[in-house]
Amino acid sequence: QKEVEQDPGPLSVPEGAIVSLNCTYSNSAFQYFMWYRQYSRKGPELLMYTYSSGNKEDGRFTAQVDKSSKYISLFIRDSQPSDSATYLCAMIKAAGNKLTFGGGTRVLVKP
Amino acid sequence: ETGVTQSPTHLIKTRGQQVTLRCSSQSGHNTVSWYQQALGQGPQFIFQYYREEENGRGNFPPRFSGLQFPNYSSELNVNALELDDSALYLCASSSPSTGRDTEAFFGQGTRLTVV
């Protein structure tokens, strides 16, 4: 079993809809949670990171962490075709230095 | 665009050969991590270099090795290439005050194909 699970999609939504992405994890030692966006043939781009449980908002993006359920989410409001990409969740342990990634969810926003 | 640059962007090698990939970290960043991303998968941690020393290694065999130079640029070397080594190799730089890669910035990657 992988430490971090993520539905591969693809997730297809109409322009303007809310995109809802999530990851589950098994190791309670993870303390820092990141979301990356990766366009085809490009490197991952950091969108947001959150420490421990709670919510964090940045523009159209909201990240949520529920450590009791070992579940994290990313919401994208007012989705645009330019949001079409693969979204990767990643996490780090408190005393760790490496990112552990989910497999990524491919998102397609249709005009 | 991040300040992390990788070269080359694409590479084709034959099984059994050796390859060297290069990474220039973002200005002010002293830590470089390397990741392997197979098609349709998330990146997997290979190793990290901090101030020219290896600072953690993932589940990769010894034929994957690296270097970090005084200017914090880095190389990834892979010996005895296997077909399964075909992947996107990503370099990430950071300047963690506490040793964590919470804000790691990735380069565009090197696409390695082993035939």
Image (cartoon, coloured by chain):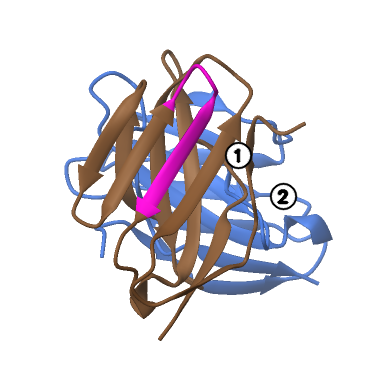
A80 or B15, which lies in front? A80
B42 inside magenta stretch: no
Residue for badge 2? B79
Identify whether A43 is placed above or below B34: below
The colour assigned to chain A within the rendered structure: brown
A52 or A41, which lies in front? A52
Looking at the image, the residue that sits furthest to the bottom is A111
Q: Of the numbered discs in the image, which one, if any, rests on residue B44?
A: none
Categorize mark 1 by other alpha carbons within 10 Å: few (<14), some (14-19), many (20+).
Answer: some
SS at badge 1: strand
The colour assigned to chain B within the rendered structure: blue
Query: Badge 2 sits on which subunit?
Result: B
SS at badge 2: loop
Any part of residue B24 in sight: no
Q: Residue at x 29, y 67 (%)?
A: A78
A72 inside magenta stretch: yes
Residue for badge 1? B65
